[in-house]
Image (spheres, rainbow, N blue to C red):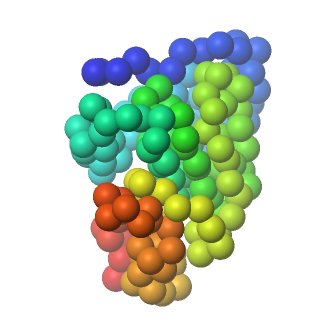
Amino acid sequence: RIYPKPKVFNKKKVNELISFSKNHIFQFNYFLKLNSGFHINHIRHQIVLFDIIKHNIFKNKSKIKFGEYACLDGYLSWNLSMLFKNITAVDINKHNIEKIKLVNQIFNTSIKPLNSDISNIKTRFNIITLLGCTYMLEKPLTEIKNIILNQISKDKKGVLYVDFRYWS
């Protein structure tokens, strides 16, 4: 790792997350003893994470606004929380937002959880990820167009990572 992973600050909340994992499926387990999830997430997340770090490692990280859409367990947000201070994890599923809230308490991260449909977001981001969920969008190309026009920063340096792996 070229940057530190977040450290556990609140051990009492770890048990709460472990209990939460008994009733909810995790893809990523934050290097904790959860009832589901892996230490390493899907390869597409790792590739995107590496690309984001590679292109932003020497930039002023306090000015970068990152949005992880359909965040699930917040793998990217959690990993980038040691680099960027302005991170928003968005998911329509309230249980995924509860995961992010517990992760914030455990690791003392400041990821902003947002329980919303991505079409309702009014904030602009420098970097947005939309991975592994395009198959769930009713009109994926229209949604991506709206994200580009209304949610990517207007400075022409914004980046949108999209995964069409499951789209048919």
57 or 27: which is nearer to us? 57
101 is higher (above) or lower (below) than 147: above
Res 159 quadrant in image: bottom left
The answer to whether residue 20 is seen in the rendering is yes
Q: How many labels does the image show?
A: 0
x and y percent of residue 142 in the render? 45, 86
86 is higher (above) or lower (below) than 137: above
x and y percent of residue 18 in the render? 68, 27
Could you tell me which residue is drawn at 31 percent across and 58 percent down? 157
114 or 155: which is nearer to us? 155
Could you tell me which residue is drawn at 65 percent across and 22 percent down? 108
The answer to whether residue 31 is seen in the rendering is no
Could you tell me which residue is drawn at 74 percent across and 21 percent down? 13
Left or right for 39, reference 9: left
x and y percent of residue 29 in the render? 52, 31
Image quadrant occupied by the N terminus: top left
90 or 75: which is nearer to us? 90
Could you tell me which residue is drawn at 55 percent across and 41 percent down? 86
Image quadrant occupied by the C terminus: bottom left
Res 36 quadrant in image: top right
Res 38 quadrant in image: top left
x and y percent of residue 39 in the render? 42, 29
Q: Residue furthest front?
A: 155
Left or right for 121, reference 147: right
